Image (cartoon, rainbow, N blue to C red):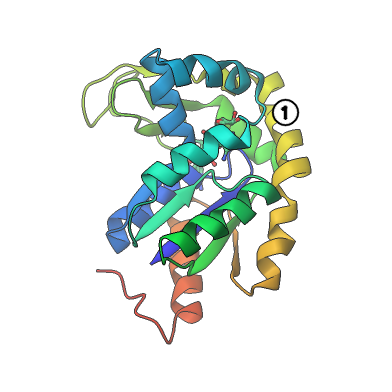
Amino acid sequence: MNLILLGAPGSGKGTEAKFLAEYYKIKKIVLGDILREEVKNNTSLGKIVSEYMKKGILVPDDIIMKVVREKLDSAGFVLDGFPRNLAQAEMLEEILKEKALSLDGVIYLKVNEEKAVERLSGRRVCKNCGAIYHIVNMPPQKEGICDKCGGKLIIRDDDREETVRKRWQVFRRETFPLISYYLKDSKLLEVDANKSKEEVFLEIKKALDSYGKDKDFSGN
Ligand code: AP5
């Protein structure tokens, strides 16, 4: 199964990508995490992308395409945070063709802006393994400490409200047009992402089940 997760900042892409990867045993390719890792390691790529990320704007397409081309090596994936504009969607088609891969579905997590801002203001991520928490909706067992690896939980640089609002503007302008782009292909599956993370995952599974009746989308 080859999937794209589309959604505004705070719609729950990272959270649902993890569920999808575990349930369907597919690889998750999370562009934001890949770029943050480069920033953390202070690589030459990290130095370039950190300026864009801090401001909440998109990293240039040529840089992103290089990363995707490298990571997208076989079937069985969920792409989180890519594509983010029409140029990236078109380039993705080329890469898929080159690698004889195809897309099975594009899941659009539709969320209300205020709810997303509230989620992002309470988000905490593990500095070590990247696990995602929320101080109210998904708290760790011990405050400030990752349940999985014991790493320190931190607030992402781009989760200040002003930057979150900027990221939403970028989403509306650049990424939202992808919804009609994928609707044309009949690949778009819209899910109400205002619900709890478990309910959202159930809706995604239901949408994939009915969409993939003729394919093997049975998961575990
Ligand atoms: P990226 O890291 O992809 O950020 P984003 O798209 O803004 O999305 P977020 O990670 O903020 O939110 P999410 O939807 O994953 O929500 P999450 O599951 O964490 O990108 C960051 C930056 O990298 C960009 O601004 C850009 O600069 C650059 N970049 C990345 N890709 C690029 C590309 N293709 N081209 C160019 N530049 C690119 O959940 C959020 C919070 O809510 C968490 O605390 C979680 O616990 C909680 N939560 C999740 N779901 C629920 C639920 N259902 N109910 C209650 N709480 C929930």
Percent position of residue 116, x then y: 63, 38
In the displayed image of the protein, which residue is found farthest to the front? 98
Quadrant where the N terminus is found in the figure: bottom left
Q: Is residue 194 visible?
A: no
| 28 in relation to 122, above or below | below
Image-based side of 55 in relation to 37, left or right: right
**Image quarter hosting the C terminus:** bottom left
**Which residue of the protein is positioned furthest toward the left in this rendering?**
149
Between 38 and 213, which is closer to the camera in this rendering? 38
Q: Is mark 1 within 8 Å of ligand 1?
A: no
Residue drawn at x 38%, y 24% is 37
In which image quadrant can residue 30 be found? top left
* Numbered marks: total: 1
Where residue 164 appears, x then y in whole percent?
A: 66, 27
* Residue holding disc 1: 165
Q: Where is residue 183 drawn, in percent x and y?
A: 69, 69
Give the structural element (helix, strand or loop) at label 1: helix
Which amino acid is tagged 1? Answer: Arg
Query: In screen coordinates, is 203 left or right of 128?
Result: right
- Left or right: where does residue 50 sit relative to residue 160? left
- Residue 149 placement: quadrant: top left
The vertical placement of 147 against 7, above or below, is above
Please say whether residue 81 is visible from this viewpoint: yes
Residue 113 x, y percent position in the rendering: 71, 40
Q: Residue at left 22%, top 32%? A: 148
Picture residue at 52% right of the left edge, 53% below the top: 5
